[in-house]
Image: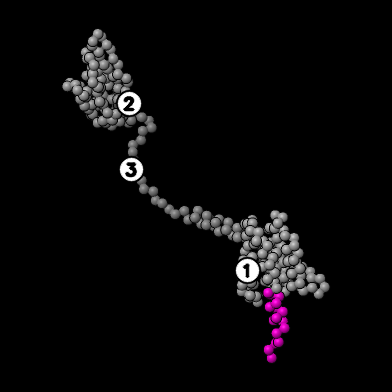
């Protein structure tokens, strides 16, 4: 048999369903009640109790059930496999919860469309701040790159070429890159080259950025291959100074020779141009 302690509940309220078999001997199984069926939900199943009197045994089980849908629902007739008799269907009335008397209750309102407006003032302010931030970053970058080099004072009849080659020999002998002074090595190397082009060609190389200096060097008389190698050296020096890049050992050793090549190449070209007879 099957029975409940009451047949009317509100949504979510729990009731007790009792399944039982009386005056039985052994049974082949038990009632099959799904966890969820026909809007009825099983909350808890207690163990099957047995009461034995002589050869007669009574079986019973309490099951807590509920429903979350309002309406009239039915627990169908339940049976045990191999047993002909079944339980009677049980009707459960599930009533909706009445909240109309509650103080905080509000009726559901219709959807109200909100007119969206573009916040142009906020967009303009953000754009202005972005431009200002980019300008500050660019200014700081340019300021960091634009380092003024003091022109050297030549001794006696020393030419710019003689001075530059002597300084390069001195730098090569110091081998600063072997003493963890790679940045100082490339900084000194580019300063020598800048000073040479200022003294020899009156270039504005002492206060130009690397990009500006490379543009002005385009018109300098020198072999294209030598000039290209020197431009690569300048880019490498920038990477070392600002990105803290450590070049391979062979690059450090070759750097002075690259600078020496551009200086001697330009010096030879200038000397050749100076001895050319002027056209009448």
Q: How is the image coloured?
A: one colour
- Residue beneath the point at 64% across and 62% down: 251
Residue 146 numbered mark, or none: none
Residue 229 numbered mark, or none: 1
**CB-based contact (under 8 Å), mark 2 and mark 3:** no
Q: Residue furthest front?
A: 250
Gap between marks 1 and 2 measured at Cα: 82 Å
Q: Quadrant of residue 63?
A: top left
Tell me the magenta residue range: 265-280
**CB-based contact (under 8 Å), mark 1 and mark 2:** no
Say which of marks 2 and 3 sits in front: 2
Q: Quadrant of residue 30?
A: top left
Label 2 packing within 10 angstroms: few (<14), some (14-19), many (20+): some
For numbered disc 1, what is the local secondary structure?
helix
For numbered disc 3, what is the local secondary structure?
loop
Residue situated in front as seen by the camera: 178 or 201? 178
Label 3 packing within 10 angstroms: few (<14), some (14-19), many (20+): few
| In this rendering, position of residue 175 left or right of residue 211 | right
């Amino acid at each position: 048999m099957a029975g409940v302690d009451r047949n009317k509940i509100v949504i979510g309220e729990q009731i007790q369903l009792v399944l039982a078999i009386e005056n039985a001997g052994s049974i082949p199984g038990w009632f099959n009640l799904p966890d969820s069926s026909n809007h009825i939900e099983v909350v808890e199943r207690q163990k099957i109790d047995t009461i034995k009197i002589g050869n007669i045994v009574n079986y019973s089980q309490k099951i807590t059930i509920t429903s979350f849908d309002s309406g009239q629902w039915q627990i169908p007739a339940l049976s045990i496999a191999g047993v002909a008799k079944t339980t009677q269907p049980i009707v459960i009335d599930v009533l909706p919860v009445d909240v109309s008397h509650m103080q905080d209750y509000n009726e559901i309102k219709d959807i109200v469309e909100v007119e969206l407006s573009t916040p142009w003032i906020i967009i303009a302010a953000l754009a202005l701040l972005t431009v200002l931030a980019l300008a500050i970053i660019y200014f700081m970058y340019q300021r960091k790159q634009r380092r003024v080099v003091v022109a050297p004072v030549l001794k006696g009849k020393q030419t710019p070429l003689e001075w530059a080659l002597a300084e390069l020999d001195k730098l090569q002998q110091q081998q600063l890159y072997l003493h963890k002074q790679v940045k100082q090595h490339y900084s000194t190397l580019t300063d020598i080259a800048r000073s040479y082009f200022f003294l020899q060609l009156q270039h504005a190389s002492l206060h130009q950025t690397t990009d500006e200096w490379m543009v002005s060097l385009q018109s300098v008389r020198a072999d294209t291959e030598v000039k290209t190698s020197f431009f690569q050296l300048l880019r490498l020096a920038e990477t070392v100074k600002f990105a803290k890049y450590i070049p391979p050992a062979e690059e450090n050793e070759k750097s002075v020779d690259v600078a020496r090549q551009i200086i001697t190449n330009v010096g030879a070209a200038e000397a050749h141009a100076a001895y050319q007879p002027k056209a009448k």
